[in-house]
Image (cartoon, grey):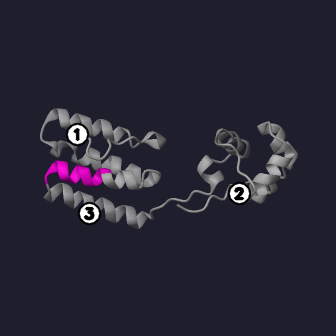
Amino acid sequence: MNELKIGENIIRLRRDRKVTQKELADFTGVTKASVSKWESGKSTPDVWLLPQIAAFFGVTVDELMGYEVILSGEQIQKIYGDLCREFAERPFGEALEEAREYAHRYYSCFPFLLQMGTLYLNHASLAGDAETSRKVLEEAEGFHGSHHQPLRRNEHL
């Protein structure tokens, strides 16, 4: 994963919004010196402060941290196409296992997870029985937003 850019982003966001270090410190309940240390890279905010800082600036925690999507749209479409072929050519369980491996590898790439949910919805009927199809559809719902929790590798339906 890319290097965290919290300090640089706090500086940029604070300056863009013409906010002082003291104003940010007062909002978050820390000292001005703490904000200065974040910005200089000498320390980072406690994890429980990240949502509060992000809300203060009107950005997501991902944006605050400098997170960038791991996969491009073209890469997502290629993986999606490859997995569609896997579902068409291989036993359902094997194709599903491969799809899960991708979901675990790119768990924080939300555009990819959206495509994975679509993949599951489009292929659940190939599961072979109603109960397995139902579980795959439930798993597809888990790809929505940040609550993605696919079954663990080798965890059976």
Q: Is residue 36 visible?
A: yes
Q: Which tag, 2 or 3, sits closer to the chain's start?
A: 2
Quadrant assignment, res 142 = top left
Q: Which tag, 2 or 1, sits closer to the chain's start?
A: 2
Name the mark nearer the viewer: 2 or 1. 1
Q: Relative to 16, is 50 above or below?
A: above
Name the mark nearer the viewer: 1 or 3. 1
Q: Residue 9 placed where, x, y %?
A: 71, 57
In three-dimensional space, the C-alpha distance between marks 2 and 3, rounded to whole angstroms, equals 37 Å
Q: Which residue is mark 1?
A: 156
Q: Residue 121 placed where, x, y %?
A: 28, 44
Three-letter code for the amino acid on which mark 2 is drawn: Asn
Q: Which residue is mark 3?
A: 82
Q: Secondary structure at mark 2?
A: helix
Q: Which residues are magenta?
A: 91-100
144 left or right, relative to 43: left
Q: Which tag, 1 or 3, sits closer to the chain's start?
A: 3
Q: Main secondary structure of the magenta part?
A: helix
Q: Which residue is mark 2?
A: 9
Q: Secondary structure at mark 3?
A: helix
Q: Secondary structure at mark 1?
A: loop
In three-dimensional space, the C-alpha distance between marks 1 and 3, rounded to whole angstroms, equals 23 Å
